[in-house]
Image: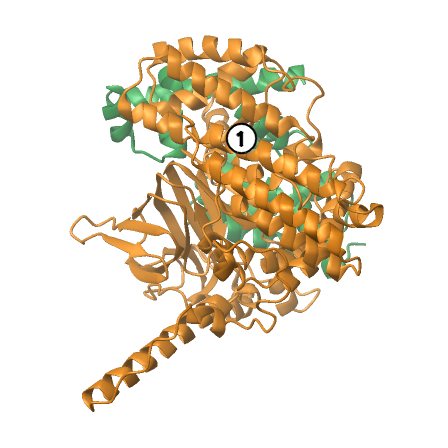
Amino acid sequence: MTDWDDRIIDSALQEVGGQQPPDLSARILIALGEGAPGQLPALPPPPRSIAGSTMLAAAFLCLGLLTAYVVSYAFDDGSRSTVEAERVALYVVSGQVEFVPADAQRPGEVVAAGSAVIVREPRGARMFVSKDSRLQLGVFPMLRVEPATELEVRSMGVSMNNGVVAATSLAIGVVVGAVTWDSLSGPEARTSGEVVRLEAMAPDGVDYSVENARLMARVQGLEEQNARLMMMREGVAAPAIPEGPVLAEALDKPDVATAMMFEDPKYADALSKVNWDAMGKATLEIQPLLNELVRILNEDGEISTEIAVQLEKLNVHLAGEIPTLMKAGLPGTGPNGAYTHPLVVANTLASTLNAAGKPLDAAQSAALAGLVKSFTAELDGVAAGPYEFQSETMMHEIEAKERFYAEMSQRLTAEQFATIYPKGSTDFDGLSLFGTGLMTRHLLRPIKAGNAADFAHRAGNRLADELGFSDAETVRLRTVLESVAGSSSGMWGKPSSAVERKLKFLRAGRTKAALRNQVAMLRAIYLQFQLTPEQQEKLSSLTGVIVPL
Amino acid sequence: MAKVLTVDPQDVSQLVHRHQAEVWRYVRFLGANAELADDLVQEAFLQLLRAPYEDQGEPARRAWLRKVAQNLYVKSFRRPPFALVDLDRIEAVWLDYAQGDGGNESLAALRECLENLDGRARQAVRLHYEERRSRREIGDRLELGEQGVKSLLRRSRELLKKCVERARREA
């Protein structure tokens, strides 16, 4: 093998390891708009300067980007095109993050929900997350982090052209655990050993509303505290601190607390803060777009960027309510576990049908209220159930929720049903906003395998990595997995479609089959291997679903 | 007569989407780091869209973009980063790898091959390319010297290259 043969595989392996080609189209379009058509761009002066033509575009971009982190401006000759960011803000939206700086001399810190720290020299910094958390670094997209996850900042590059910021990128290694986030093409996920690569949002796309609201709430809180202290000092009785989060008041939500039709005293307070009207309107618009996205992908083999962008904009309305739903304490696996809880589903259904002008009648509402009550009780039981594996709990949760969706559908008129489940929306798991596929899509870990032996080999390698098995144990593990996978029904049949491979919308029923197989595999491992307590704990907490595609 | 390739913004976006991954992979293969690769790809596209250029179809356009990016890369050094007599060899290796799709098929095949890689080779590749561990760290983990790790990684890449070639022949 020649040196160049070696280099081609080396660069390809780096791409597989996370250094993937970025989408430069927006950057090129902006740069193109700054130059006169037909004019030959000046080549960069030697030795190392590129892209003088992008300076104005870069200056435009830097206005937004510089607000988040500070970079070194020690440019002697403009020759360096990239620098590492010196610091970045880490904001914990929910949950809790233990942050350990790369520099061992500096102390670590536990960052609680709603607070932020400045991470100096982010490269090499580690973050430990023990429970479901959401965090944001600088202006990069928000990450949802699963429990027992360890992250490491691999690099945070700030590309500079002639001293101004042109673009930024962040690479975070998932040492252990799993991370999900929303990108233009839909939800993304990375698990142990994989690398999250993010591009900074352009200034036009920066959503400062959450940060503004947080700061407004903070200011309001401090002003109130100040007033109370002054009154106490002057011997005047201090007024009671208003109840409830001021954050919600600071957000621009004029329709808050509208039209909550189905209630449960246990969750009523928190759920009354959800903007159900907005949820219904967004749901009504999103579903046809999802169907269209899949139709185009089936026909052209391409994901429509235009529809993906529209979906992302609409999804903000739904995703914006997730923290409130999570805060309500509804049982369920992950954020979409709360979203697919019968209480939330029934209210979303009612508001969606209202938005469509086909509201539920009194009899339907009464029937649904009964269903919500009984399935809520059942799901409480599932959440408290004596299951060995988190995957098993999830499987039972999905089965109960699927029965709820089926019962709910039977109460709808044909017209209402067509609105909620437009034709094609039930062909794939996760495509319908009224289905359990929403819960599992970001947990899918696809591998290419056409039969049980292939599957066992690759799944075995992954699970062996997770559990820290020796080579000998890995070989034995494959035999065990092949036996389990070979007897699983619904796993082997039609080859996977583009929709399954590119969007992770699996053919209806395939997710459940894969989940059943996953639970069977975990149980077989538990029974047939001598596991250490740490390995048992790891096995029990695995939520990723390995699925052959 | 050569003319400026005039395309509207939406088509520019499509044009970039169509070719950017290949050009980026190509300059990474030449040795550019990720950030420099971004700059080189941007500049190559700007030249394509601004300079007099007679479009002769997709294969010619891909070759043109690679050539421009290659020139920009070479010129970003005081001395060429590799012997210029190697250029034919470089192009041949690239074309063999990228085939007609900019390297997508080969990359998919490589992912498959990685799933089948076992033992220490698998561990070394994972530690080096996914966890970005140094040779010393990998050596400590696998009880090998740094030179041993280097050899193991090279042998692993050789195995993977053969596997990718076999997979593409069978496809």
Viewport quadrant of the C terminus of chain A: top right
Residue A1 image position (x, y, % from top left): 47, 19
Q: Depth check: A284 or A478 in front? A: A284
Q: Residue furthest right?
A: A414
SS state under label 1: helix
- Residue type beneath disc 1: His
Q: Depth check: A541 or A128 in front? A: A541
Q: Depth check: A209 or A141 in front? A: A209
Residue A396 image position (x, y, % from top left): 53, 30
Chain containing mark 1: A
Q: From the image, tell me which residue sits under label 1.
A: A396
Relative to A68, is B101 on the left or the right? right
| Residue A81 visible, this orientation | no
A86 versus A481 height, above or below: below
Instruction: State the green chain.
Output: B
Relative to B25, is A105 on the left or the right? left
Residue B25 image position (x, y, % from top left): 55, 39
**How many tags in the picture?**
1
Instruction: State the orange chain.
Output: A
B8 versus A289 height, above or below: below
Q: How is the image coloured?
A: by chain
| Residue at x 38% of width, y 18% of height | B121
Q: Local crowd at mark 1 within 10 Å, few (<14), some, or many (≥20)?
A: some
| Residue at x 64% of width, y 35% of height | A402
Q: Residue furthest left?
A: A105
B84 versus A450 height, above or below: below
Residue B44 image position (x, y, % from top left): 60, 52
Residue A548 quadrant: top right
| Residue A395 visible, this orientation | yes
